[in-house]
Amino acid sequence: MIKVEGLYHSYTKDEKYAVKNANFEVEKGEVFGFLGPSGAGKSTTQGILTGLLQLQTGKVNVAGYDIRKLDRRMFNKIGMSFEQSNVYGKLTALENLEFYRKLFDVPTNDPKELLKIVGLEHVANKRAIEFSKGMKHRLTFVRSMLNNPELWFLDEPTTGLDPAIASQIKDIVKAKNDEGTTVFLTTHNMYVADELCNRVAFIIDGDIKLIDSPRNLKLQYGEKLVEVEYRVSDTLKKEKLSLIDEKDRLHLNEIINTGQVELMHTKEATLEEIFIKVTGRGLE
Amino acid sequence: MRLLYNFLKDMKLSSKSFYFYVELAMALIMVFVLLFVVPENFDRQQTFYVHMNLEGVVADKVEEVLEGSDDNYILLDSREAVEAALEKERSSAGVSISMEGQKVIYDFILQGYEDEKFKNIIETVVKSEFAVKTPDYNRVTEIKVLDENAEKLNDRLNMLPIILTLNATFMGLFIIASYIFLDKDEGTIKALAVTPGYIWEYLLGKVGVIMVTGLASGFIVLIPLAGAKAHYIHFIPLLIMTNLFGSALGLFIASFFDTMAKAMGWLYGTIITLGFASISYYMPAFSPLVIRLLPSYPMLFAYREILLDKPDLSLVYMNVGLFGVLSVILFLFANGRYKKTLTV
């Protein structure tokens, strides 16, 4: 669905690259996460893929279209949800969606249905300027679904939202992906990436350091440990036991058999820990 | 169809914004000022205090000239009385006319602020009005009017071309730039850029809104002030093309900037520069090449033709064609620039 080869981009048109020598592919039906801290080059890459920034060096193919010879018909196939809400404040939620749907040459979703999906049906006729930040974000998000995109670009889709709405947004992304939509997700939120992505790319200083699935990364970089909390008489005990060491495995078995276990967690590494291990930098 | 949807959306947005009403409000203010403050013709009469120490035929002839003059002449008894009257009325002038042998002496008493041009006019008036009436005067100058049917507009109507040029035509230059920067601020341009719509459709939608307000403000001014005298059928294409030119120029200038604050200086400077043409419009004797090259210069005279009984239609339609072509060129340049800069 996306093929990028030797992509470079410099805002100053010199050798200070915001993105340097990026190479990656996104398969149809995949949720691909672009993970990195602010200023890493995530939004620049996404900007080039969506035609918002001019391609300077490299080859980029999106949804079967060569970005160098941008064909406006490509936008019938893609959807883009921006990190910053960008709706017409003086128009109502419904007017916003009604206007954008008319710009597509393909069948579009019913704006009222879309507003219902994100819980905005009760404010359909309210001007967007009166919306809270979260409501504006949901309107921006749902606008990107108007044309039933085959390829869906999501820029920080849950940033700044309360947990309930963020969960709702993630459920929608999962559902659309189940229907076959390819998702290109840009985020610095490791939990969102972990939950949604089939594969993630770690980008820092414009450089893609690694691309793999969260599962493989956890297996590769995580420690095979179990943290267990159990009760002996009235005393609560807490231990970290290796799943590889035979002695620890037998001890864990013994604890389980006594039936005194209160809490038990596998201690695989989080994506953030792996990111720090790989890049030497945090995600914030 | 996308162009129509863009236009309708922009009409809806602009009708809810302050900028949409600025041009219309300005037009209404102009109408009010011209109808109730500005007279149809300015009073050009100047008061002349005259002391005459003449006798015989010469005195009769001078009195004959004074009686037939458009200016307001007041005869006083002495030169001192003339000077005292001038002290009281600073806009007046005075003259003491006396004879020395066979020579008539015109002793003009001025306020001191008059320029050489005014003094030359006085000299010419003396020669053409007074001297020719004196016995034995030999006229060697012959004045021929080439176009005896040349039509003059009254002072109020004569101001209309400037108002139409600056308000209905060039006000859009500011407003279209402000619409673009508002969209940039709101980020909605980026959302449009990821739809199949073209930049030119987006820009033309805005041009359409400016044209609607331009036409509305043009008619608001023209109908009450010119009434049936204006040639509306020729006014409409002229206003459309000049308004289009104003919008295209505004788009072009705005394409070099990312905020209204940065663009303001250039937009303001452009309006002021275009306004210089009105100096030559009022004083045709002052029309250096640099002013004649301003687009507003031919525009002013084309609007003037619309108000004449027998308009020079070739001048009107030459302007329609000229501004049509210039608008297309500027719009194409602006479109090219926005393709690269609008979403950055």
Image (cartoon, helix red, strand yellow):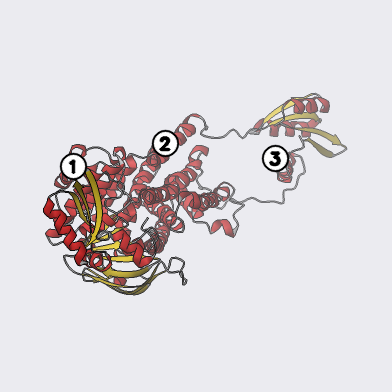
Regarding mark 1 in the picture, which secondary structure is present there? loop
- Looking at the image, is B216 positioned above or below residue A76? above
Q: Nearest the camera: B45 or B156? A: B156
**Total label count?**
3
Label 1: how many Cα within 10 Å (few below 14, some 14–19, many 20+)? some
At a point 28% along the width and 57% down the height, the residue shown is: A190
For marks 2 and 1, give the one nearer the viewer.
1
In percent of width and height, residue B124 lies at 71, 44
Instruction: From the top left corner, tell me how far across and down residue A280 is, in percent.
Output: 39, 64
Q: Which residue is mark 1?
A: A119
Left or right, residue A114 beside residue B128: left
- The quadrant where residue A33 appears: bottom left
Q: Which residue is mark 2?
A: B25
The chain carrying label 1 is A
Residue A30 vs residue B290, the one in the foreground = A30
Q: Is residue A52 visible?
A: no
The residue to which callout 3 is attached is B129
Name the quadrant of the C terminus of chain B.
bottom left
The answer to which quarter of the image holds residue A283 is bottom left
The reply, left or right, for residue B45 in relation to residue B304 is: right
Judged by depth in the image, the label closer to the viewer, 1 or 3, is: 1
Q: In the displayed orientation, state which residue is furthest to the front.
A: A233
Quarter of the image where the N terminus of chain B is located: bottom left
> In this picture, is B142 found above or below B154?
below
Measure the alpha-carbon separation of dots 2 and 1. Answer: 42 Å
Residue B142's place in the image compared with A245, above or below, is: above
